Image: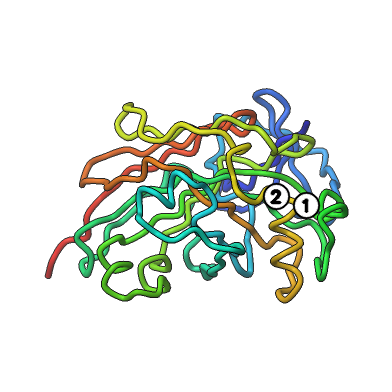
Amino acid sequence: MARYIRFISDGAIAWGLLDNDEVHVLAQAPWLGVEETGIYLDVGGVNLLAPCEPGKIVCVGTNYYDHIQELDFDTPATPILFIKPSTCVNDPGATLMRPRSSQRLDFEGELAFVVGKTAKRVSAIQAADYIFGYTILNDVTARDLQAADVQWTRAKCFDGFAPIGPWLTTGINPSDLELTTRLNGEVKQHSRTSLMMWGVPKLLEFITEGITLLPGDVVTTGTPAGIGSMADGDTVEIEIESLGVLSNPVRWEKQQ
């Protein structure tokens, strides 16, 4: 198992391999080849950024039965897909801003993976060869706008609505990981990835039948029950076994 980060230090953005509290600075994104520069930094002296720069984020809606029940949705026959643009990407520790046009901002804790090479019509049995690593994503949603619009684009795609991190982990089995979301320390979501309707390999197969994924693209796999709203001043934390904790403060955009 290895952990990779993207960070900023002294005004420069770089990639790194985490070795306990030491960062081995890399020459490029790790899925392009792990090439160390020979520079070492203390992790306490760097600011973590989202551990990827996706051209697109392909999201899976309603992939847990209990989440379907809490939203009173019909059970889908196949995965429901939508896409968040790159402008949704947000960093670990960065502020989640509720836009002026929404009155309800929800958290959705999710397992996500980053594609390591171009993926087109990948079979489920080949999936592991195309996935570089795993991370955590908060599929932030303006729930009132989702209900008002029927389709989900506006509600899901405001700037900063996809915090990702804190790092990218390789060498793990994603099939049965514990997922916990806490709001101000109180547990709101608690589930396991084994309860997904479609696991990671099947999702990659379904998506790449018609959508080509490029190196660095992200797929996020859906959220379990327990979604809820966030208020001004809250802190939301999503923890997934072996992947760390993604934490973000919440603020409301001021009305003009």
Residue 96 rendering spot, x and y as whole percentages: 35, 52
**Disc 1 secondary structure class:** strand
Image height check: is 148 above or below 9? below
- Among the 4 quarters of the image, the one containing residue 149: bottom left
Residue 29 rendering spot, x and y as whole percentages: 75, 54
Residue 109 rendering spot, x and y as whole percentages: 47, 44
For the residues labelled 1 and 2, the Cα–Cα distance comes to 10 Å
At a point 43% along the width and 38% down the height, the residue shown is: 247
Give the amino acid at mark 1: Ile
Image height check: is 196 above or below 105? above
Work out whether residue 139 or residue 256 is closer to the camera in this orientation and state it.
139
At a point 25% along the width and 64% down the height, the residue shown is: 144
Give the amino acid at mark 2: Val
Q: Nearer the viewer, mark 1 or mark 2?
A: 2
Q: Quadrant of the N terminus?
A: top right
At a point 44% along the width and 43% down the height, the residue shown is: 66
- How many marks on residues? 2
**Disc 2 secondary structure class:** helix
Nearer-N-terminus badge (1/2): 1
Q: Viewed as shown, does residue 27 lie left or right of 111?
A: right
Work out whether residue 178 or residue 135 is closer to the camera in this orientation and state it.
178
Label 2 environment density (alpha carbons within 10 Å; few <14, some 14–19, many ≥20) = many
Label 1 environment density (alpha carbons within 10 Å; few <14, some 14–19, many ≥20) = many
Q: Read off the residue under disc 1.
A: 131
Q: Read off the residue under disc 2.
A: 200
Work out whether residue 8 or residue 10 is closer to the camera in this orientation and state it.
8
Q: Viewed as shown, does residue 92 lie left or right of 232?
A: right
Residue 15 rendering spot, x and y as whole percentages: 69, 48
